[in-house]
Amino acid sequence: MPGNPVSWFELGVSDMARARRFYETVLGVSLTNMPTEEVPDYWAFPMRDDQVGAGGALTLMPQMPPGPGGTLVYFQCDDCSVEEGRVEPAGGRVLRSKRRVGHYGCIAICEDTEGNPFGLYSQA
C-alpha cells in the first residue's frame, strides 16, 4: 500500500451545531454538509485531491457516541499553539499544552465540546 493508508475519519458528536462551531473556530475552516439518507447531518472537513492526508467528518449517529477512549485524530497546523489558543474560548479544553516530540515536531492534546480528545500537530 503506497503512501498514507489512512483515508477517512469520523468524530461522533451529540450537538452538531456546537461541534461545527467549535472546529470551524479552532481550525479556522468551513465544514461542508455531505448528507445521506442514513445520516442527514454529516459535516466534512475541507479536503483537496492534491494534498496528502486523510479527509474526515463530524457525524451524529446513535451507534457512534462522542467521548474519550477511541482513536486520537491529529490536525495539521503551521504552529499548533495558535489553534491551541482558540480551544478554550471556543468551549473546549486543553488537556496537554504544546510540547516538542523529539525531532518530529510539536503536539498539543485538547478536548472538543463533545468530550472527544483530539491532537494538534506542527513542525514548529
Image (cartoon, rainbow, N blue to C red):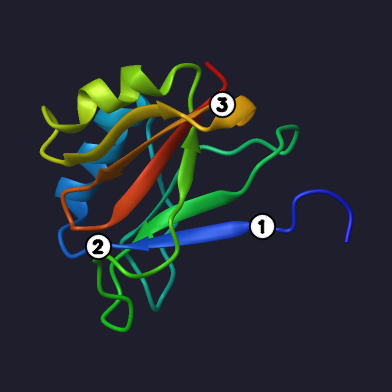
Quick check: 79 above or below 100? above
* Residue type beneath disc 2: Val
Residue 13, labelled with which disc? 2
Disc 3: which residue: 105
Q: In whole angstroms, how far apart are the C-alphas of marks 2 and 1?
A: 21 Å
Mark toward the viewer: 3 or 1: 3
Identified at 48% across, 25% down, the residue is: 77
* Residue type beneath disc 1: Val
| Secondary structure of residue under mark 2 | loop
Marks 2 & 1, CB-CB < 8 Å contact: no
Q: In whole angstroms, how far apart are the C-alphas of marks 3 and 1?
A: 20 Å
Horizontal arrangement in the rendering, residue 35 relative to residue 8 (left or right): left
Crowding near pointer 3: few (<14 within 10 Å), some, many (20+)? some
Residue 41 in picture, x, y percent from top left: 31, 62
| Secondary structure of residue under mark 3 | loop
Q: In whole angstroms, how far apart are the C-alphas of marks 3 and 2?
A: 29 Å
Disc 1: which residue: 6
Crowding near pointer 1: few (<14 within 10 Å), some, many (20+)? few
* Residue type beneath disc 3: Gly
Q: Earlier in the sequence, mark 2 or mark 1?
A: 1
Residue 114 in picture, x, y percent from top left: 18, 57
Identified at 21% across, 55% down, the residue is: 16
Mark toward the viewer: 3 or 2: 3
